[in-house]
Image (spheres, coloured by chain):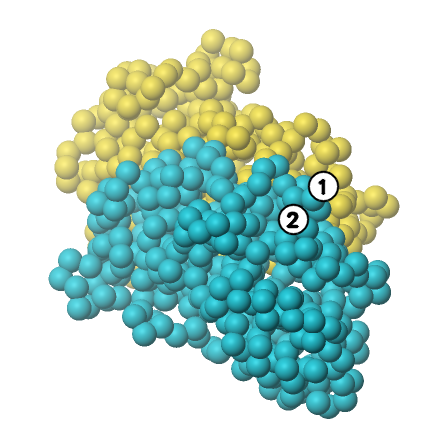
Chain colours: A yellow, B cyan
């Protein structure tokens, strides 16, 4: 049975959730619980579902990572002067001390504006099919660039205004020139996004689970191995698959029951419908990555659930139609701890920004 | 003449500005411009005025710095969850990327409340006679503790509420216990302040000027040496003296003319009068340290002047009654760059905070 479910997962990446539903949830044979071997085959099974371990850098054809770009990008990641009230930088909603999330239900941007959704971590984020919960940002470069104008984020009136701020800080133009030697006038909002994107492509957090995927059987503790089995047997990996344990597809939040019956959501979010205006995309969100999930409470698109144990139970209930036992929840939680990785040392070192002139 | 002015500076530390005025500004002999030798005596002169170079750690009798306290303090420095809206930490207004100031005229705290004054850097701040512009915080420990309740900073309703937040994050109690082994129930607001204070006492930034004070004549460039002479000849060092080049006394801002005639202040600030209610303390502020001053625009208690060159000129005009020439301004600016120090490597490494449970 498990042999059937795995190709299905592969097929489904980047596909619409409705196809997914018809294959996985409506077809009983696939929906039934597979039974994974406790033996050495487990690594083989895991490799097939989760694919290769994390890369060292998440590459991009359109924005190759260079040291100059990543260095500038790290500085810009901390730059508050480029926001309309001087208080917002990428680091404000993605501080590394909280694993690049901010601990809030919904992030607070310039002039106390509330963002529409919870801030997902930027760690490993470049590995996803798109950015933001509803996939309305193509990639990390697009996300960073558009954040400049986002009314509840940086809130700048125009890209030109942001570029003017950066040009007025004398230390920046030479750094942009070094990062974008092909541009004659390189202090551009697009390059702001590319530099930050390049930095974010280095934000990869290898964890014990990667060592396990590489074949080190002792990389996971016994309870984490048991948890991995539970995670696969219960069916979590039908969506949370691939190297990033998620981030590869869209899915309706609340397949068996509306999500707001279980979360503490204050309002109903139409999800990806906002992007596509297709009825089938109502309450559809990008499946979040589970890497470092234990470090990034609160959970879900609206941060409406504070405890990971509760989030796991709700997922079982409304996505898989299963009332997970206390033992199953605990087991899955154990597996999830194996996804907590190490933030690159260089990323944790605060850059010094050029002073205002 | 210089021999007269130096003991005067020594006498004046920690004294009221009115005594200072009577000695320095009313006594013409002392107010006249001294002439410092360009010779090797300059180091000797500088040592007498500025005293010893920066210590490695700014010690405290009441809060001895231990590695456990400083480690916990660095974590708490980044902790936003202990603010009423989850957005404020010490690092918000004192980010190391901008040399532990925030680049704003006045800091923005919880729920977008505007702080009454500009955020001074916390680098070397423990070396001052008191904290805050008007000296209404005894020391860095007191400042950090009271920030928890400060309506425009963390805005917590009570110390108890802050302690409850910290206790609910399971990772913290053991760290408090390790830092304060003498306390049975160590998760206390007072210890929050002590831990952060201990961390801040390590935030010492040795600069080329310290090497110069230690006797290395080549530590300063020629224009910085000339700038040091100008700084002393013009009279800046009558207030900006001691190891921290300031931070040791209170002084009226606007001795020769009201400050608001020259700054872009939006309202008149009574200064230390707010603390003492003494008429003589109207418009009196703590003399700010000049260490790292080129990195921490904007300037003055209300951040009303954006450029250091302008701030230097205004100081000459209203504090010393001198219309500094372009050459004198440039020369003083050169000296000020020798005060830009190195932030300790460990301080620049972002700590990982215990996750919410």
Observer-nearest of A115 and A180: A115
- The answer, for residue A92, to whether it is visible in the render is no
Q: What element carries label 1?
A: helix
What is the C-alpha distance between the residues marked 2 and 1? 28 Å
Residue lying furthest bottom: B40
Observer-nearest of B316 and A195: B316
Q: What is the quadrant of residue A310 in the picture?
A: top left
B164 lies left or right of B107 = left
The answer as to whether the residues below labels 2 and 1 share one chain is no
* Residue behind mark 1: A165
Q: Position of residue A232 (x, y in %)?
A: 29, 38
Q: Where is residue A236 in the image (x, y as percent from the top left)?
A: 32, 34
Q: Dot 1: within a 10 Å radius of its alpha carbon, few (fewer than 14), some, or many (20 or more) residues?
A: some
Q: Is mark 2 on a helix, strand or loop?
A: helix
Q: In this view, does A123 lie above or below B174?
A: above
Q: Where is residue A300 in the image (x, y as percent from the top left)?
A: 36, 30
Observer-nearest of A130 and A226: A130
């Amino acid at each position: 049975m498990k042999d059937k479910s795995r190709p299905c997962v592969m097929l489904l990446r980047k596909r619409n959730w409705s196809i997914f539903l018809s294959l996985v949830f409506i077809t009983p044979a696939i929906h039934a619980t597979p039974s994974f071997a406790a033996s050495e085959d487990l690594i083989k099974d895991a490799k097939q579902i989760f694919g290769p371990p994390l890369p060292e850098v998440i590459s991009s054809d359109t924005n190759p990572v260079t040291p100059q770009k990543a260095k500038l990008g790290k500085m810009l990641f901390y730059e508050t002067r480029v926001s309309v009230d001087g208080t917002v930088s990428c680091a404000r909603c993605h501080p590394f001390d909280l694993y690049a999330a901010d601990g809030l239900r919904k992030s607070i941007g310039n002039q106390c504006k509330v963002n529409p959704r919870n801030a997902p971590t930027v760690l490993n984020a470049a590995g996803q099919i798109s950015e933001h919960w509803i996939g309305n940002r193509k990639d990390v470069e697009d996300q960073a660039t558009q954040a400049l104008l986002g009314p509840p984020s940086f809130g700048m009136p125009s890209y030109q205004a942001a570029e003017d701020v950066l040009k007025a800080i004398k230390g920046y133009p030479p750094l942009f020139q070094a990062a974008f030697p092909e541009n004659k006038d390189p202090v551009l909002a697009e390059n702001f996004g590319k530099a930050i994107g390049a930095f974010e492509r280095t934000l990869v957090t290898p964890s014990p689970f990667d060592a396990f995927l590489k074949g080190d059987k002792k990389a996971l503790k016994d309870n984490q191995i048991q948890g991995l089995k539970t995670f696969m047997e219960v069916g979590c990996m039908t969506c949370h698959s691939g190297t990033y344990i998620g981030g590869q597809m869209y899915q309706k939040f609340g397949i068996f029951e509306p999500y707001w019956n279980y979360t503490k959501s204050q309002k109903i979010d139409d999800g990806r419908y906002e992007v596509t205006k297709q009825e089938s995309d109502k309450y559809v969100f990008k499946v979040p990555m589970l890497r470092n999930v234990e470090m990034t409470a609160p959970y879900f698109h609206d941060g409406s659930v504070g405890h990971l144990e509760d989030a796991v139970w709700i997922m079982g209930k409304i996505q898989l139609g299963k009332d997970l036992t206390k033992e199953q929840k605990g087991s899955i939680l154990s597996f999830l701890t194996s996804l907590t990785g190490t933030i690159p040392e260089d990323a944790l070192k605060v850059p010094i920004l050029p002073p205002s002139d």
